Image (tube, helix red, strand yellow):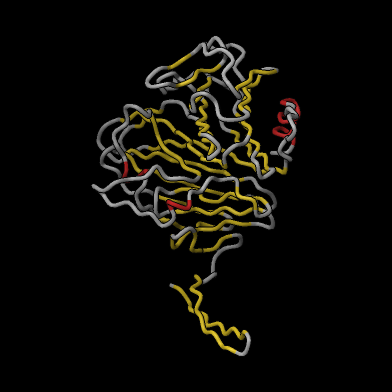
Amino acid sequence: MTDIFIRILTLSGLIFLFTIPVFSQDTPKGTAWIDCHGYSKCIQLFNNDTKVVLEPNCGGRVIEYSLNGQNSIFVDPAHDGWMYTPGKRTIDPCGGRLDIGPEMTIPNHNDIWVGTWSAEITGPYTARLTSVKDKATGVQLIREFKLNADNSHLKCTQIIKNIGNETKQYYHWSRTLAEGNGIFLVPLNPDSRFPRGYIIYGPGPVMNYDWRDPQNVEVRDGYLIVTGEPPQPQIGLDSYDGWLAYITRGNLLFIKKFPMYPDRIYSDMAATTVMIYYYKDKMCELEPMGPRETIRPGKSVSYTEDWWLLPYEYPKGGVKINPSLIKEMVFTKTK
């Protein structure tokens, strides 16, 4: 339900009448219904310095996660207002996306990947997005979000519910598109099965475990650091530290923390636990993965990521980041 407010503007003796549609704001603290990027009935979670916008019309995405007005999420204006029609062409949507894997063997699931979700505000600073019951995969996805009242901490939980009559095996796959041309950092596994601690996907169906000194990719002090466009956009790791960091050109440090399970099976093709997809200067996809879940009929599993945004000046003039300082911020500023 919307209310229409009529505004009168006087300029140079002329009177202009125009209307602004707004949603009733009878909602819990730190929440609102808004229109955004060509979509109606998006949910905004907010506090004094952080804003989150959840978009249910095309895949149940986060299309804004901002600190002091600076958005960390890549949003393509060409996608504004786009809606899925079964049988028609689809897009690879921008935004803070979540998905399920395994990537190469999961059935096509456009009804949840780009379809319409239901949205509800569930309390102060909290909201839920729910997918349709997807016949192709046999699951329904529920995404719950909670913003801290006093800082940028956003808790993102994805629930995978088996709606069919057969046991399913899937895993949580985060596919957050951050603003492009930043610096990515993640701890390497000192006992990695990859000779260089990471693997590069491509060109084509190749998984290259021994690409020597790729451009803009550096291993230093036990960390993988990507400072610009690599020779191939997708990189996978078997890191078990449970965090990654990304420095945006907008002077933000985007931190993700997530649970790891070294004794469980990770069923991406290369059994990676973290991936990135660094595409030119447009975006960088931050991809924590959960372990393989065996989900019996009628049962559900969940996986939670914790996000933070912190002020951090993007290094210029050839200055290199100090991984130890980033790690210190991860463990002292995200409690």
Q: Dividing the image into 4 quarters, which one contains the C terminus?
A: top right
- The quadrant in which residue 123 appears is bottom right
Q: Position of residue 74 (x, y in %)?
A: 53, 45
Above or below, 271 relative to 47: above
Q: Dividing the image into 4 quarters, which one contains the N terminus?
A: bottom left
Q: Position of residue 216 (x, y in %)?
A: 61, 24
Q: Is residue 81 left or right of residue 68?
A: left
Q: Residue at x 67, y 42 (%)?
A: 252
Nearer to me, 17 or 246 = 17
> Residue placed farthest to the bottom in the image?
13
Q: Position of residue 240 (x, y in %)?
A: 57, 22
Above or below, 29 relative to 199: below
Q: Residue at x 26, y 49 (%)?
A: 86
Q: Residue at x 47, y 42 (%)?
A: 97
Q: How many numbered circles are shown? A: 0
- The quadrant in which residue 293 appears is top left
> Residue placed farthest to the front in the image?
12
Q: Position of residue 6 (x, y in %)?
A: 52, 83
Q: Is residue 41 left or right of residue 257?
A: left
